[in-house]
Amino acid sequence: MGKEVPVANKIKTDLHEILDIRHLTDSTFVLRIEKKDLDFEAGQHVCVGPPNGIHTREYSIYSAEQDDCLEILVKEVENGLVSPSLKKVQKGGYVVVEEPVGYFTINKDLPADQKYVFIASGTGISPFHSFVKSKSNLNYTLLHGVKKADEAYDSDVYEKGKYVLCTSQDTKGDYNGRVTSYLKDNKFGTDVHYYLCGNCNMIHDVYDILEEQGVSTDNIHAEVYF
Amino acid sequence: MKKKVGFKTLGCRLNQFETDALASKFVGLGYEVAEDSRNADVFVVNTCTVTNQSDQKSRSVVNKAINQGHTGMMIITGCMANHHKEQLEKRYPNAYVVNNEQKSAIPQLVEAHFNKEILPANESKGGVFSYVPAAETFHTRSMIKIQDGCDNYCTFCIIPKVRGRAVSRSVDDILENIRQVVGFGYKEVVITGVNISRYLSDGVGFSGLLKQIVDIDLDFRVRISSIEPDSFDDDFFKLLEHPKITPHLHLCLQSASESVLLQMRRMYTYKLYKRIVEKLRNINPLFNITTDIIVGFPGETESDFAQSLSALEELGFGHVHTFKYSKREDTRAARMTKVIDEREKSKRSELMRQKSLHAKIKYRQQFIGQSLSVLIDTVKDDFSKGYGEYYVPVKINQKLEKNHLHTLTITGIETGGDDPCLIAERIAL
Ligand SMILES: Cc1cc2nc3c(=O)[nH]c(=O)nc-3n(C[C@H](O)[C@H](O)[C@H](O)COP(=O)(O)OP(=O)(O)OC[C@H]3O[C@@H](n4cnc5c(N)ncnc54)[C@H](O)[C@@H]3O)c2cc1C
């Protein structure tokens, strides 16, 4: 028989030091973690958990590919298991991090001037933050659906006119209503690649709207959080 | 009766802590827990490797259990498993050697083992396809393992946790393996792995690999086993027209409801799946598409289920493997709240089973009057049996040569069981 057939790579896990915690709202924070040798492609996620437990959860990487640390954007889920304990970790402490994984990445075969529309709900903005910070001259529009305008996480990072804050429960956003309504009112065309990230219901509805607008499913990419 | 899991812990307090955590997980899953291997269905040795002596001690615990007649599942974990994995796998070929990083997934591993979803890593080496008994495949079809692991993270699936990250075997190794088995006399190779459509080695993707396989200048046919419908390119569809590639795909659907597919974090929509099926049937109107469907996934409404049922007719499946959703700890779906009642799941499963049998008969009846190239794998006194290129069973009341391809004309179908066999006309020998 030939050489041995490889057996799946065991998932590599390591303890990473917490370098900083930046609170964006009462419930949402950015955890900056030591990167060690973890390379990743923007859009991928890591599983992260407290150092003393056996549970981890998936978090999209928020930072840029070239940064020398890793960042994740976490929203504390009430009665959740992992996110509340991540909120309690302290600078100088540790978290368990598994190596990055996932296919929610930008296809390298697409032309450099490809137009993208990124559609996020809540912390679903995280991979888009990483796309924008990792790749210069990205031709994009980012639609961010939140309840209230204070959830416009780090919106100053995005170029003016490229970020559209859609608020459903106050009128302080760029658009007063859900991202789904925005999309119905504003068509972006069928040549565009659409990236959808966040909760299932938003993704489901956006799929329907885009398909109605004639967008091929080949041009729609989704990352479901919950 | 409750299954019994025995533990032996060596070394530090962290190990003891982890054993206790594991034991309580097993209790939660309905197992009885004991502190030795006697009468245990599963024996977990949580090893230590801090000194040579601890290595020896760890080994002697394993040996003692075996000498005392432990024949159940054996799991060796802990630091020694991390440091001496290969050595341990060689020495104890029937044991699962689980490194520390995966220790917490041992309960899932055990369940997967008892559900026959996995085998110890060593047994899956050497191109042996894990769910087909070796005797059945001997000199008929050979399983060629091209990759292992999966990075898809479907919410119901424990495989990434127990199997690990996707890794692909080199093209040269695969081609060499195929030349070898065809040399041994195999007429059919089955391309297999955990998630084969994501094959990637040195820039060669699945279609690239398939092209090199069909280009091997030997006489054999290629069957693609279970595949995920999420990353097909145009080259793949072109390759399916190649005479060496059999017109059959086990294309996992899981649900025909778009919202359930999203909850499952599948990487395709039902619409995309349908388009793939259309393309396959354009290549060959009889293309056999078989699939897996999960019924009773958390939150699956009557209407979601009805969509899966109608997919059977819409897509004309040749076979559907119906799974009643069962919760696997440590998966995202296990934390979902809208759980479907067990009785309702059974009802849906039975409906799905009946309808899929109907679809299967309808699909197979299309072959009556057609000629099929049948690879005979079973020869008894008064009949021979095998599979045609579409992977449909064919029976003939005649003794034919085993492991040979015979062109047979189909005259009828034997109904009655769950796997209706096509009947072929006797041939002149
Ligand atoms: C690929 C992937 C990437 C992810 N990336 C991020 C990320 O960048 N940032 C982030 O905050 N979360 C992200 N998540 C969600 C994250 O993995 C956890 O599910 C979340 O932090 C809750 O975990 P928990 O243990 O606190 O709650 P659990 O105990 O696991 O769950 C409690 C309940 O909360 C629901 N829930 C999960 N996430 C949310 C949410 N954000 N808002 C409201 N309800 C929720 C679950 O459906 C569940 O019913 C991602 C999920 C996936 C699959």
Image (cartoon, rainbow, N blue to C red):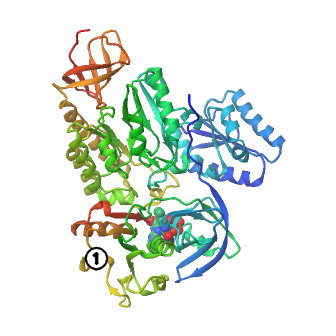
Q: Position of residue B298 (x, y in %)?
A: 38, 57
Task: Name the one closer to the observer, B202 or B145.
Answer: B202
Q: Position of residue B66 (x, y in %)?
A: 69, 29
Question: Does mark 1 have its CB less than 8 Å from ligand 1?
Answer: no
Residue drawn at the location 81% of the way across and 43% of the way down: B54
Residue lying furthest left: B369
Q: Position of residue B168 (x, y in %)?
A: 51, 45
Residue drawn at the location 46% of the way across and 30% of the way down: B178
In the figure, B218 relative to B267: above or below? Answer: above
Badge 1 amino acid:
Leu
Q: Chain of mark 1?
A: A
Task: Name the one closer to the observer, A35 or A80.
Answer: A35
Q: Which residue is mark 1?
A: A183
Q: Secondary structure at mark 1?
A: helix
Q: Is residue B74 left or right of residue B50?
A: left
Quadrant location, the C terminus of chain B: top left
Q: Is residue A172 left or right of residue B421?
A: right
Please indicate, yes or no, whether residue B191 appears anywhere in the rendered image. Answer: yes
Q: Position of residue B249 (x, y in %)?
A: 33, 39
Residue B39's quadrant in the figure? top right
Residue drawn at the location 56% of the way across and 41% of the way down: A6
Q: Is residue A95 left or right of residue B412?
A: right
Residue B136's quadrant in the figure? top left
Residue B381's quadrant in the figure? top left
Residue drawn at the location 59% of the way across and 74% of the way down: A31
Disc 1 crowd rating (10 Å Cα; few below 14, some 14-19, many 20+) is some
In the figure, B241 relative to B15: above or below? Answer: above
Task: Name the one closer to the observer, B293 or B188.
Answer: B188
Please indicate, yes or no, whether residue B321 appears anywhere in the rendered image. Answer: no
In the figure, B248 relative to B186: above or below? Answer: below
